[in-house]
Amino acid sequence: MRIWTYLRPFSHLGVDYTVEVYFTFSQTFSRLFRGKKLLDEQSIQHMDGIQTFVHALPADVGRAVRVEVGYVSWWSVGIAVLQGDHAVYESHPGKNVRFAEGMMQGSAPSLANDGSSDPASSGLDIGQMIESNQSKWQRNKYSIYADLALGAMFYLVGKFTEDLALAAIVGAGAGLALVVLQRFVKVDLLGGFAVFGTIMLVISAAFSLALQDDYWVQMKGTVLGLLTASVFMIDGVFRHGAYFGARIERYMPLPLHHNRIAVGMSGLGTVMALANYYVAENFSEDFWLTWTTFLDMPLSIVLFYAIIFWARKKPTDPA
């Protein structure tokens, strides 16, 4: 299932090409077309990190020409058509298509400034980054699968029974069952937030049982979101992110300031809590169910990347 697509058309020697970049829940794809003919397709798993795709134009165009495809900012993808080290076309003139790779290492040199987009010239070791991310994926994948399964269970029960209170209780019960199951299996089902997650599940179940009203089930996301935001803020301000900030860093491919990531996540929780309140107050229950299961995720991802950008450690930062 596609969740977003970028199209970047360009012409070279009078021939029309298009680069299509699209995202699914697990992968990023980059495809090069000449007219409507597919010339090349590449992909990468999200958990393998960020990669600049390189497509070669057909040999019949003359000198070797390649198309580099990557992030030019945290929210946009661009292309650079290169002949040797010379850029013959840029979708975002002066922007570096290896921006995101540079951010992972604390620097993102401009293509226009150094005349080269070779990762070696910017000191990037993409192989090490991918290997590190693959290791983290193997360590954390079961807890991610568990989170997705719980979300799907809540959506399906709510959709087919039209009883949000029941969906919340079933979801909380399944979460508590995971806590029990964790004692008997070796794989990590709960990630680095087992204690906090258990507490929130108990609060969530109690909330749903005490107020078995669909409106208050909708408001649960706002109430718990503000509560979670407060806890993150306390950790970030008074404990310098020693608990939550340190645990979030476990899942990231780059070092982070623990206090900043905790404060940033507090801000994210506040924004999403207020957004949940707005949707519940102004739209139908069915739309709210779709929002809380699917539509709030893209907004959360954008805000999360902004937080990572702010919280990342630069090489010049003190240890």
Image (tube, helix red, strand yellow):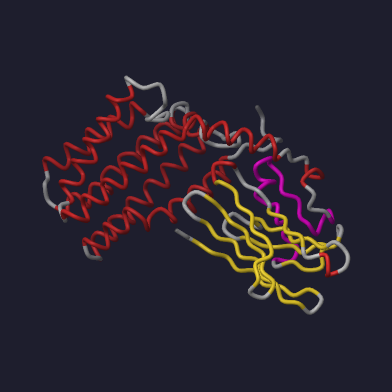
The image quarter containing residue 283 is bottom left
Residue range of the region highlighted in magenta in the rendering: 92-115
Residue 177 painted magenta: no
Q: Residue at x 33, y 26 (%)?
A: 195
Q: Is residue 230 left or right of residue 289?
A: right
Q: Residue at x 83, y 70 (%)?
A: 61
Which is more toward the observer, 230 or 251? 251
Which is more toward the observer, 52 or 317? 52
Q: In this view, does 257 lie to the left or right of 232?
A: right
Q: Is residue 291 left or right of residue 169?
A: right
Query: Residue 37: x, y in percent?
Result: 65, 71
Residue 99 painted magenta: yes
Query: Residue 286: x, y in percent?
Result: 23, 62
The image quarter containing residue 225 is top left
Which is more toward the observer, 32 or 264? 32
On screen, 88 above or below 265?
below
Quadrant where the image shows the N terminus:
bottom left
On screen, 241 above or below 226?
above
Q: Which residue is drawn at 32% across and 20% down?
A: 183
Query: Residue 279: x, y in percent?
Result: 29, 61
Q: In this view, does 63 lie to the left or right of 268?
A: right
Q: Residue at x 65, y 42 (%)?
A: 104
Quadrant where the image shows the C terminus:
top right
On screen, 225 above or below 1?
above
Query: Residue 213: x, y in percent?
Result: 12, 51
